[in-house]
Structure formats: structure tokens, C-alpha cells
Amino acid sequence: MGRRTALRAGLAATALAGGAALAAKPATAAMAVTEDGWVSVLAHGAVGDGVTDDTAAIQAAFDAARATTPTMGVLFPAGRTYRVSNRVTLSGLTDTALRGHGATLALVDAAPVTVKDQVRGVLQIQDCHRLKVLGLNLVDHAATYWYSGVVITASTGIVVDGVVSRGFRHTGISVWDNTPGTSNDILITNCTTEDVRFGIGSNGHDVRITNNHVAMDWLSSQEAEDWGGVWRAESKYYDGINVWFGADRTVISGNTITECGQAGVYTQQVTNLVVADNTVSGCQLRGIEIDGSARGALPRSGQAVGVSITGNVATNCVGHINVLASRDVTVVGNRVENPDARRAVSCVAVHQGSTKAVVVGNHLRQAHPSHPAVFVDTASVDVTLAWNAVEAAVPYQTPADTVIIRRGGAGQIRAEGKFIAVGGIGVGNSVAATTPGSVVRKIEVFSSTGQSLGWVPVYNSIT
């Protein structure tokens, strides 16, 4: 039995055992409003014993909160497992919160959703504004149908904090609208997603995905065991954090992302993206992939534009930082390592027509004996590689017009490409030549516009 199967079995057993224990004692009576400003789901018929279907009761509590003026919050009393068989929808709430610390919302015997594009959120947040969702656990024991844990749509000012989402066939926590950017100003923080197809996803605007733990543990899953540790396209497990086509002003920061079926961070044709200070390891495709290329129904002329990848650690992935069809990209201050000498993957790759890309100040370690640590393809232009600390048998594979500035040895700087010093070059140890020896080298001199001004001879001795 794989670790993932064991996890599901353990969650199911815990829920049933906890439910039985709770059912054995009478439910505590609850007021319609628990504390000042909170509507308890227990007051609307929820039992929370892990056995009773509480779907209708929870929806009734949500609707009751929406009907109050000012809007009251919704409370899931702690220590209970609330079983649902379909989604529950929190809609029309403004300036309030859902509090679920220590409570579990479990999808059991789910209503069938067999079409992936019709995915439902077990907790659906729709047309809400300035709402906080705090501390709720969500779990799907079977992952039979296309459900996500939390889905946010047509909403603004949402904070999802401390939520745990496990076992869903689709996405743990998702910001999704048919028109990208309809949802905006969203913060997803301090959350955990495990054992899901996609961890956290968004096509919203002004979305911050920070300080979360995203884990699929694919290498220890039953699927990986069955397939001999080689991922295939029919897998149930894909990317850790996704930013979909049309997203703008997204920040992905401070997350730990481990053993995803595909990429740790995967983004499409997006704008103004920051990927910073994440730790990504053991993913079966790239650690971080910025993919501005045309795929499926995406525009053929699309690109990812305005991307900053900085301060991340990416290690032991099948590819690490991969930039495709992107413009105005900076890759700065990352630590990237391929520790497997058998795995022919780069630490940083810039290709498929990327332009205006700067790769600066990264620490790159490549164990493979012949694969380059940094790869730039011939279709990519205006690429600068500078001051990277590269430990590799083959540091770079790049077109001739790529600018590379690097440490050439102790006390040495090596520049590949034309070096133009408009203000001149001063040489501190120059001496007057009286009897020059033989010419052994010539240095070509260029004007500030790159025009050749001729050659300067270099002699083998001066006396």
C-alpha cells in the first residue's frame, strides 16, 4: 500500500471513528447566533458526527448569515466532522468571516461530477467581498468525482488563512472565473494542500499566494509505486501552484512545494508575476516553469510578460527554472541544483523565443557530466547571463550573441560577447614599451555603437 493510499485510509477511519464517538453522546444545543455576530451551523440542523449528511443544514446556515444586517459570520464549532455530499455555497457575504478552526468538512458519497470542466468546490465562495475563511479542514476520502476543496469566483477582498485541503480530484484551493480577473485582491496564506491534482490555482488579478505548504508526495504514492516511479500523462497528480492564462499581478512567495506530479510552479500567458523565496523539491517536471507559449485554445501570439523569479531554492526536479516564450524576465539570486548525474536537465533554461531575459547572481550546481547548467536556445534573443556561480562540467550552452559575464578564475572576469566601455578602460599596471617582442594576440576595439575600430597588438614581451 502506497503512502497516499494509507493516508486516505487513515483519514477515513479517523472520520468514522470520530463520528461514531460524537454520535454516541447527545448533540449540544446551540443558539442561532453563537457569540456575538456568529451563526453556528449546528443551530441550523448540522450534527457534525461524521455520519449524518449535513449538506442542507450547512447551506441553511450560510443563507441565514447572508440574510442578517449587518452580515454575521458563520461558525463551524471545533472538534467535529461535518459530512457533505455536494458543494455548499457561500454567496453574497460582505465584511464578515467563516470560522472553522478545528472543524472538518468531509466530502462523502459525493453527487457525481464526471466532466472535469464542470468541477465543483466543496466550499464555493461566490460574489463575496472582504470575507475571511479561517482554519477549516476540507477532505475528500475517495476522489471519485471532479471536486475541488475551495473555489473562489466573482469575489474581491478574500482572505483564505490556515485552511487545509486534502484528497480532492481537482484543486485544493482555486481562484477561477470564466473571464480572467473577475476575482481580485485575494490572499491565500498559511494553508496546506496535499494529495490533490493541483495544489493552488488562480486566474485572478492581484492574487497573493504566500507561506503555504503544497505537497503531493507523488514519489511515495501508490500510483508511482505501480508505475515504477515514472510519471505518465494519465496521472491524477499535476502541478503544485498554477497561474492560468489572463492572470495579472500575482505574487507566489514563501511556499514549500514538494514532490508534485509535474511542475512545482506552473504559469501560462500571464503578466506582472513575482515568484520569490519558495522552496521547490522533488517535482517530476520543472521546479518553476513560466510558459508563455500558445497551447490549445490560448492565443498564438501570447507571451508571459513581466516576470521576476528571485530568491527561490529549486532542487532535485526534472528540470528546474524553465522560461518559455516570455518577455521582460529576471531570474535573480536563486539556488538551483540538479544532484543526479544521470538526469540530463538544466538548472536554468531560456527558450522558445523568449526575449529581454536577465539571469543574474544565481548559484547553480549541475551534476550531469555533459548537460549544460544554463541553456539558451537560438530562438531567444536579448539574453544576458551575469555573475552566476556555476558549478558544472558544461556551464553554458548559448547562441553566439548571448552576453555572458562571469568569473574566469582567481581574480579574473571573463566576458563573452562584445565589451564596450564608452568611458574608456584604465589599466593599472601598464608600462611604456621600449623594445616589444613578437605579436601573439590582437584585441579588436569597437566604438560605442559596436563598429570595429581596428586591432591592438599584444606582444609576448616588453623590455
Image (spheres, helix red, strand yellow):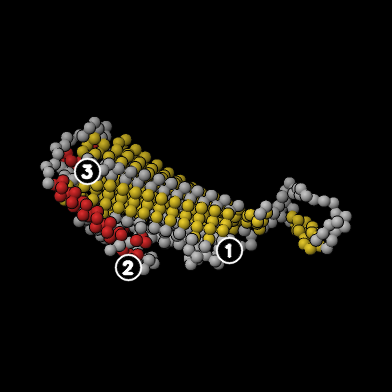
Residue visible at 22% across and 43% down in the picture: 79
**Which one is in front, 339 or 130?**
339
Could you tell which of marks 1 and 2 lies nearer the N-terminus? 2
Q: Position of residue 104 (x, y in %)?
A: 24, 47
Residue visible at 15% across and 47% down in the picture: 21
For label 3, the residue is 79
Inter-mark Cα distance, 3 to 1: 56 Å
**Which one is in front, 322 or 182?**
322
**Which one is in front, 258 or 100?**
258
Q: Amino acid at mark 2?
A: Asp
Under circle 2, the secondary element is helix
Residue visible at 11% across and 42% down in the picture: 26
For label 2, the residue is 226
Inter-mark Cα distance, 1 to 2: 36 Å
Looking at the rendered image, the quarter that the C terminus falls into is bottom right
Q: Amino acid at mark 3?
A: Gly
Q: Position of residue 239 (x, y in %)?
A: 39, 57
Q: Position of residue 169 (x, y in %)?
A: 30, 57
Q: Position of residue 367 (x, y in %)?
A: 52, 62
